[in-house]
Protein backbone atom coordinates (compact mmCIF):
# COMPACT_ATOMS: atom_id res chain seq x y z
CA UNK A 1 0.00 0.00 0.00
CA UNK A 2 1.33 3.43 -0.92
CA UNK A 3 2.20 6.00 1.79
CA UNK A 4 -0.56 8.24 0.41
CA UNK A 5 -3.22 5.55 0.92
CA UNK A 6 -1.84 4.71 4.36
CA UNK A 7 -2.22 8.36 5.37
CA UNK A 8 -5.77 8.51 4.00
CA UNK A 9 -6.73 5.33 5.90
CA UNK A 10 -5.25 6.69 9.12
CA UNK A 11 -7.16 9.96 8.77
CA UNK A 12 -10.35 8.06 7.89
CA UNK A 13 -9.95 5.80 10.93
CA UNK A 14 -9.45 8.73 13.30
CA UNK A 15 -12.40 10.59 11.73
CA UNK A 16 -14.62 7.50 12.06
CA UNK A 17 -13.66 7.12 15.73
CA UNK A 18 -14.48 10.79 16.31
CA UNK A 19 -17.88 10.41 14.60
CA UNK A 20 -18.71 7.36 16.75
CA UNK A 21 -17.92 9.34 19.93
CA UNK A 22 -20.03 12.26 18.66
CA UNK A 23 -22.88 9.81 17.92
CA UNK A 24 -22.79 8.39 21.44
CA UNK A 25 -22.73 11.87 22.96
CA UNK A 26 -25.60 13.06 20.71
CA UNK A 27 -27.81 10.05 21.50
CA UNK A 28 -27.21 10.33 25.23
CA UNK A 29 -28.23 13.98 25.12
CA UNK A 30 -31.24 13.52 22.88
CA UNK A 31 -29.79 14.93 19.65
CA UNK A 32 -30.85 12.43 16.99
CA UNK A 33 -31.18 14.48 13.80
CA UNK A 34 -27.66 15.65 12.84
CA UNK A 35 -25.06 12.98 13.66
CA UNK A 36 -26.10 10.37 10.97
CA UNK A 37 -24.97 12.74 8.23
CA UNK A 38 -21.44 12.75 9.63
CA UNK A 39 -21.03 9.11 8.49
CA UNK A 40 -21.09 10.18 4.83
CA UNK A 41 -17.64 11.80 5.15
CA UNK A 42 -15.60 8.63 5.98
CA UNK A 43 -17.57 6.75 3.28
CA UNK A 44 -16.48 9.36 0.72
CA UNK A 45 -12.87 9.20 1.92
CA UNK A 46 -12.57 5.40 1.83
CA UNK A 47 -14.24 5.25 -1.58
CA UNK A 48 -11.69 7.72 -2.91
CA UNK A 49 -8.49 6.15 -1.54
CA UNK A 50 -9.40 2.42 -1.49
CA UNK A 51 -12.49 1.79 -3.66
CA UNK A 52 -12.11 -1.99 -3.53
CA UNK A 53 -12.71 -1.94 0.25
CA UNK A 54 -15.38 0.77 0.25
CA UNK A 55 -18.41 -1.56 0.22
CA UNK A 56 -17.09 -3.71 3.10
CA UNK A 57 -16.20 -0.61 5.11
CA UNK A 58 -19.64 0.91 4.49
CA UNK A 59 -21.51 -2.24 5.59
CA UNK A 60 -19.42 -2.53 8.76
CA UNK A 61 -19.83 1.18 9.48
CA UNK A 62 -23.59 0.87 8.92
CA UNK A 63 -23.85 -1.96 11.43
CA UNK A 64 -21.77 0.03 13.94
CA UNK A 65 -24.16 2.96 13.40
CA UNK A 66 -27.20 0.72 14.06
CA UNK A 67 -25.56 -0.77 17.13
CA UNK A 68 -24.83 2.64 18.59
CA UNK A 69 -28.44 3.77 17.97
CA UNK A 70 -29.90 0.67 19.67
CA UNK A 71 -27.48 0.82 22.59
CA UNK A 72 -27.47 4.54 23.38
CA UNK A 73 -30.58 5.97 21.72
CA UNK A 74 -34.08 6.23 23.23
CA UNK A 75 -36.50 3.38 22.52
CA UNK A 76 -38.31 5.02 19.65
CA UNK A 77 -39.89 3.32 16.63
CA UNK A 78 -39.35 6.52 14.66
CA UNK A 79 -35.62 6.56 15.54
CA UNK A 80 -35.21 2.87 14.67
CA UNK A 81 -36.94 3.33 11.29
CA UNK A 82 -34.83 6.38 10.47
CA UNK A 83 -31.68 4.47 11.47
CA UNK A 84 -32.55 1.57 9.13
CA UNK A 85 -33.17 4.06 6.33
CA UNK A 86 -29.78 5.66 6.95
CA UNK A 87 -28.19 2.18 7.00
CA UNK A 88 -29.48 1.46 3.48
CA UNK A 89 -28.46 4.94 2.33
CA UNK A 90 -24.91 4.36 3.62
CA UNK A 91 -24.61 0.97 1.87
CA UNK A 92 -26.07 2.25 -1.40
CA UNK A 93 -23.82 5.29 -1.30
CA UNK A 94 -20.78 3.09 -0.65
CA UNK A 95 -21.61 0.79 -3.60
CA UNK A 96 -22.14 3.69 -6.02
CA UNK A 97 -19.05 5.58 -4.88
CA UNK A 98 -16.88 2.43 -4.98
CA UNK A 99 -17.96 1.70 -8.56
CA UNK A 100 -17.36 5.30 -9.61
CA UNK A 101 -13.97 5.49 -7.87
CA UNK A 102 -12.87 2.18 -9.39
CA UNK A 103 -13.71 3.52 -12.84
CA UNK A 104 -11.80 6.73 -12.13
CA UNK A 105 -8.78 4.76 -10.92
CA UNK A 106 -8.84 2.54 -14.02
CA UNK A 107 -9.14 5.54 -16.32
CA UNK A 108 -6.26 7.23 -14.50
CA UNK A 109 -4.14 4.08 -14.84
CA UNK A 110 -4.89 3.72 -18.56
CA UNK A 111 -4.16 7.42 -19.05
CA UNK A 112 -0.75 7.00 -17.38
CA UNK A 113 0.03 3.99 -19.57
CA UNK A 114 -1.18 5.92 -22.62
CA UNK A 115 0.95 8.97 -21.90
CA UNK A 116 4.13 7.21 -20.72
CA UNK A 117 4.22 4.50 -23.40
CA UNK A 118 7.44 4.33 -25.40
CA UNK A 119 5.35 3.58 -28.50
CA UNK A 120 3.25 6.17 -30.26
CA UNK A 121 -0.47 5.55 -29.68
CA UNK A 122 -3.42 6.96 -31.62
CA UNK A 123 -7.13 6.33 -31.17
CA UNK A 124 -9.05 6.73 -34.42
CA UNK A 125 -12.76 6.87 -35.24
CA UNK A 126 -13.71 4.08 -37.65
CA UNK A 127 -16.55 6.12 -39.14
CA UNK A 128 -14.85 9.48 -39.73
CA UNK A 129 -11.21 8.28 -39.64
CA UNK A 130 -10.43 11.29 -37.45
CA UNK A 131 -7.78 11.00 -34.74
CA UNK A 132 -9.53 11.11 -31.37
CA UNK A 133 -6.46 11.19 -29.13
CA UNK A 134 -2.67 10.94 -29.41
CA UNK A 135 -0.05 10.41 -26.73
CA UNK A 136 3.14 12.42 -26.36
CA UNK A 137 5.30 9.80 -28.09
CA UNK A 138 3.05 9.76 -31.18
CA UNK A 139 3.22 13.54 -31.37
CA UNK A 140 7.00 13.46 -30.99
CA UNK A 141 7.47 10.84 -33.73
CA UNK A 142 5.19 12.67 -36.16
CA UNK A 143 6.46 16.16 -35.31
CA UNK A 144 3.12 17.50 -34.06
CA UNK A 145 1.84 18.80 -30.74
CA UNK A 146 -0.65 16.38 -29.14
CA UNK A 147 -3.57 18.81 -29.55
CA UNK A 148 -2.68 19.28 -33.25
CA UNK A 149 -3.16 15.58 -33.92
CA UNK A 150 -6.60 15.48 -32.29
CA UNK A 151 -9.22 15.92 -35.01
CA UNK A 152 -6.73 15.39 -37.85
CA UNK A 153 -7.77 13.05 -40.66
CA UNK A 154 -5.64 9.93 -40.27
CA UNK A 155 -5.40 9.65 -44.06
CA UNK A 156 -3.32 12.87 -44.11
CA UNK A 157 -0.46 10.98 -42.41
CA UNK A 158 -0.13 8.25 -45.05
CA UNK A 159 2.58 8.42 -47.70
CA UNK A 160 1.45 5.45 -49.79
CA UNK A 161 -2.29 5.19 -50.53
CA UNK A 162 -1.92 1.48 -51.36
CA UNK A 163 -0.54 0.80 -47.90
CA UNK A 164 -3.41 2.78 -46.41
CA UNK A 165 -6.03 0.75 -48.30
CA UNK A 166 -4.32 -2.53 -47.33
CA UNK A 167 -4.20 -1.54 -43.64
CA UNK A 168 -7.86 -0.44 -43.55
CA UNK A 169 -8.94 -3.66 -45.29
CA UNK A 170 -6.95 -5.78 -42.82
CA UNK A 171 -8.52 -4.03 -39.82
CA UNK A 172 -12.00 -4.33 -41.34
CA UNK A 173 -11.59 -8.05 -42.19
CA UNK A 174 -9.53 -9.28 -39.23
CA UNK A 175 -9.94 -6.58 -36.58
CA UNK A 176 -6.19 -6.39 -35.96
CA UNK A 177 -2.85 -5.54 -37.52
CA UNK A 178 0.32 -7.11 -36.18
CA UNK A 179 3.68 -5.47 -36.95
CA UNK A 180 3.02 -4.00 -40.38
CA UNK A 181 5.73 -1.74 -41.86
CA UNK A 182 4.22 1.43 -43.34
CA UNK A 183 5.45 4.83 -44.48
CA UNK A 184 3.95 7.93 -42.85
CA UNK A 185 4.47 11.66 -43.36
CA UNK A 186 5.53 13.93 -40.52
CA UNK A 187 4.19 17.44 -40.09
CA UNK A 188 7.09 18.80 -42.17
CA UNK A 189 6.14 16.25 -44.91
CA UNK A 190 9.28 14.16 -44.48
CA UNK A 191 8.68 10.42 -44.77
CA UNK A 192 9.36 7.99 -41.94
CA UNK A 193 8.92 4.24 -41.65
CA UNK A 194 7.00 2.88 -38.67
CA UNK A 195 6.10 -0.57 -37.38
CA UNK A 196 2.33 -0.55 -36.79
CA UNK A 197 0.06 -2.70 -34.65
CA UNK A 198 -3.66 -1.98 -34.37
CA UNK A 199 -6.87 -3.41 -32.97
CA UNK A 200 -10.53 -2.43 -32.71
CA UNK A 201 -11.62 -1.59 -29.14
CA UNK A 202 -14.88 -2.65 -27.50
CA UNK A 203 -16.10 0.92 -27.93
CA UNK A 204 -15.68 0.61 -31.70
CA UNK A 205 -12.71 2.89 -32.35
CA UNK A 206 -9.30 1.78 -33.61
CA UNK A 207 -6.32 1.80 -31.26
CA UNK A 208 -3.10 2.05 -33.24
CA UNK A 209 0.41 1.85 -31.81
CA UNK A 210 3.59 2.41 -33.78
CA UNK A 211 7.35 2.72 -33.41
CA UNK A 212 9.78 4.64 -35.59
CA UNK A 213 11.98 2.16 -37.48
CA UNK A 214 13.34 4.59 -40.07
CA UNK A 215 16.96 4.30 -38.93
CA UNK A 216 16.79 0.52 -38.55
CA UNK A 217 15.17 0.16 -41.98
CA UNK A 218 17.80 2.40 -43.54
CA UNK A 219 20.57 0.27 -42.04
CA UNK A 220 18.79 -2.90 -43.16
CA UNK A 221 18.43 -1.56 -46.71
CA UNK A 222 22.09 -0.55 -46.74
CA UNK A 223 23.04 -4.02 -45.50
CA UNK A 224 20.96 -5.67 -48.24
CA UNK A 225 22.48 -3.35 -50.83
CA UNK A 226 25.96 -4.10 -49.51
CA UNK A 227 25.19 -7.82 -49.56
CA UNK A 228 24.02 -7.56 -53.18
CA UNK A 229 27.20 -5.72 -54.17
CA UNK A 230 29.30 -8.28 -52.30
CA UNK A 231 27.43 -11.18 -53.90
CA UNK A 232 27.86 -9.64 -57.36
CA UNK A 233 31.61 -9.22 -56.87
CA UNK A 234 31.96 -12.58 -55.13
CA UNK A 235 30.18 -14.60 -57.81
CA UNK A 236 31.52 -12.47 -60.65
CA UNK A 237 35.20 -13.03 -59.78
CA UNK A 238 37.35 -14.76 -62.40
CA UNK A 239 38.99 -16.99 -59.78
CA UNK A 240 37.50 -19.48 -57.36
CA UNK A 241 36.94 -17.96 -53.89
CA UNK A 242 36.23 -19.93 -50.73
CA UNK A 243 35.46 -18.34 -47.32
CA UNK A 244 36.38 -20.55 -44.37
CA UNK A 245 37.68 -20.44 -40.80
CA UNK A 246 41.28 -21.11 -39.75
CA UNK A 247 40.43 -24.79 -39.27
CA UNK A 248 39.23 -25.04 -42.86
CA UNK A 249 35.43 -25.21 -42.27
CA UNK A 250 33.84 -23.70 -45.38
CA UNK A 251 31.26 -20.91 -45.03
CA UNK A 252 30.85 -19.78 -48.65
CA UNK A 253 32.07 -20.70 -52.14
CA UNK A 254 31.50 -18.75 -55.33
CA UNK A 255 30.27 -19.93 -58.74
CA UNK A 256 33.81 -20.43 -60.14
CA UNK A 257 34.73 -22.67 -57.19
CA UNK A 258 31.72 -24.85 -58.00
CA UNK A 259 32.74 -24.90 -61.67
CA UNK A 260 36.36 -25.82 -60.88
CA UNK A 261 35.73 -28.57 -58.33
CA UNK A 262 32.22 -29.77 -59.25
CA UNK A 263 30.61 -29.29 -55.83
CA UNK A 264 27.42 -27.33 -55.21
CA UNK A 265 27.46 -24.49 -52.65
CA UNK A 266 25.56 -26.68 -50.21
CA UNK A 267 28.08 -29.50 -50.62
CA UNK A 268 30.95 -27.08 -50.03
CA UNK A 269 29.39 -25.96 -46.74
CA UNK A 270 29.41 -29.55 -45.48
CA UNK A 271 33.14 -29.88 -46.11
CA UNK A 272 36.44 -28.58 -44.81
CA UNK A 273 39.11 -27.11 -47.08
CA UNK A 274 41.36 -29.96 -45.91
CA UNK A 275 38.82 -32.47 -47.31
CA UNK A 276 39.58 -31.07 -50.78
CA UNK A 277 43.36 -31.49 -50.61
CA UNK A 278 44.93 -34.49 -52.38
CA UNK A 279 47.76 -34.32 -49.81
CA UNK A 280 46.31 -32.72 -46.61
CA UNK A 281 49.73 -31.56 -45.43
CA UNK A 282 50.07 -29.25 -48.41
CA UNK A 283 47.01 -27.22 -47.33
CA UNK A 284 48.22 -24.51 -44.95
CA UNK A 285 51.59 -26.07 -44.06
CA UNK A 286 51.85 -26.25 -40.26
CA UNK A 287 55.21 -24.45 -40.19
CA UNK A 288 53.66 -21.45 -41.93
CA UNK A 289 50.38 -21.16 -40.02
CA UNK A 290 51.86 -18.93 -37.32
CA UNK A 291 53.42 -16.66 -39.92
CA UNK A 292 50.10 -16.59 -41.77
CA UNK A 293 48.11 -15.50 -38.69
CA UNK A 294 50.77 -12.90 -37.89
CA UNK A 295 51.06 -11.47 -41.42
CA UNK A 296 47.44 -12.06 -42.41
CA UNK A 297 48.39 -13.38 -45.84
CA UNK A 298 49.91 -16.52 -47.38
CA UNK A 299 50.52 -17.77 -50.93
CA UNK A 300 51.24 -21.40 -51.72
CA UNK A 301 50.62 -24.15 -54.24
CA UNK A 302 48.58 -27.28 -53.61
CA UNK A 303 46.60 -29.98 -55.37
CA UNK A 304 42.83 -30.27 -54.91
CA UNK A 305 40.58 -33.24 -55.51
CA UNK A 306 37.52 -32.58 -57.67
CA UNK A 307 34.14 -34.19 -57.04
CA UNK A 308 34.77 -36.62 -59.96
CA UNK A 309 38.03 -37.78 -58.31
CA UNK A 310 40.48 -36.04 -60.62
CA UNK A 311 43.20 -33.76 -59.27
CA UNK A 312 43.79 -30.10 -60.07
CA UNK A 313 46.97 -28.11 -59.54
CA UNK A 314 46.15 -24.77 -57.90
CA UNK A 315 47.74 -21.66 -56.45
CA UNK A 316 46.02 -20.54 -53.23
CA UNK A 317 46.23 -16.97 -51.97
CA UNK A 318 44.68 -16.71 -48.48
CA UNK A 319 43.96 -13.56 -46.51
CA UNK A 320 42.58 -13.04 -42.99
CA UNK A 321 39.17 -11.33 -43.04
CA UNK A 322 35.83 -11.34 -41.18
CA UNK A 323 32.58 -13.19 -41.82
CA UNK A 324 29.53 -11.87 -39.93
CA UNK A 325 31.83 -10.41 -37.30
CA UNK A 326 33.82 -13.63 -36.84
CA UNK A 327 37.50 -14.19 -37.83
CA UNK A 328 37.66 -15.93 -41.21
CA UNK A 329 39.96 -16.64 -44.14
CA UNK A 330 39.28 -15.78 -47.78
CA UNK A 331 41.16 -18.14 -50.08
CA UNK A 332 41.43 -17.27 -53.76
CA UNK A 333 42.15 -20.38 -55.85
CA UNK A 334 43.75 -20.13 -59.30
CA UNK A 335 43.92 -23.10 -61.68
CA UNK A 336 47.58 -23.92 -62.55
CA UNK A 337 46.85 -26.96 -64.67
CA UNK A 338 47.46 -25.22 -68.00
CA UNK A 339 50.51 -23.38 -66.65
CA UNK A 340 51.99 -26.65 -65.37
CA UNK A 341 51.36 -28.37 -68.71
CA UNK A 342 53.11 -25.52 -70.53
Image: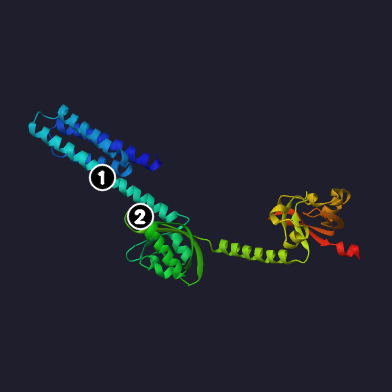
Q: Is residue 1 left or right of residue 312?
A: left
Q: Residue furthest left?
A: 77
Tell me where residue 64 appears, x and y as whole percent: 22, 31
Q: Is residue 38 visible?
A: no
For the residue carrying disc 2, how many other residues have a C-alpha within 10 Å: few (<14), some (14-19), or many (20+)?
A: few
Q: Is residue 51 left or right of residue 73?
A: right
Badge number at residue 97: 1
Residue that mark 2 sits on: 201
341 vs 8: above or below: below
Q: Nearer the viewer, residue 299 or 153?
A: 299
| Quadrant (top left, top right, bottom left, bottom right) of the C terminus | bottom right
Tell me where residue 13 appears, x and y as whole percent: 30, 36
SS class, disc 2 = loop
- Report the residue at 89% width, 49% height from top: 287
Tell me where residue 211 appears, x and y as whole percent: 49, 59
Q: Nearer the viewer, residue 119 or 306?
A: 306
17 vs 124: above or below: above
- Report the residue at 24% width, 37% height from top: 58
Q: Nearer the viewer, residue 35 or 125?
A: 125
Q: Nearer the viewer, mark 2 or mark 1?
A: 2
Q: Nearer the viewer, residue 221 or 27?
A: 221
Kindly indicate the quadrant of the structure image that contains residue 259: bottom right
Q: Is residue 256 left or right of residue 64?
A: right
Image coloring type? rainbow
What is the CA distance from the residue labelled 2 to the residue labelled 1? 26 Å
- Report the residue at 42% width, 56% height from top: 115
| Quadrant (top left, top right, bottom left, bottom right) of the N terminus | top left
SS class, disc 1 = helix
Tell me where residue 235 appears, x and y as whole percent: 71, 64
Badge number at residue 301: none
Amino acid sequence: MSPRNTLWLSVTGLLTLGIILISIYSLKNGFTDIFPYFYILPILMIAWCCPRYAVYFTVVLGWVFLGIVYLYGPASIQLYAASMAFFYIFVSLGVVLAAFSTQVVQERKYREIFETSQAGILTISRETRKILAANRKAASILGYASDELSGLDFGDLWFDSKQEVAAIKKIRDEGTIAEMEVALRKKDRTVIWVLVSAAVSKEGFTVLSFMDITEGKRMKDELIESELRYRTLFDGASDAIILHDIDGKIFEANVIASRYLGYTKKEFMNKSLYDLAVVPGTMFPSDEVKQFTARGHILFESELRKKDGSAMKVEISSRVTEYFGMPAVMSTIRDLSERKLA
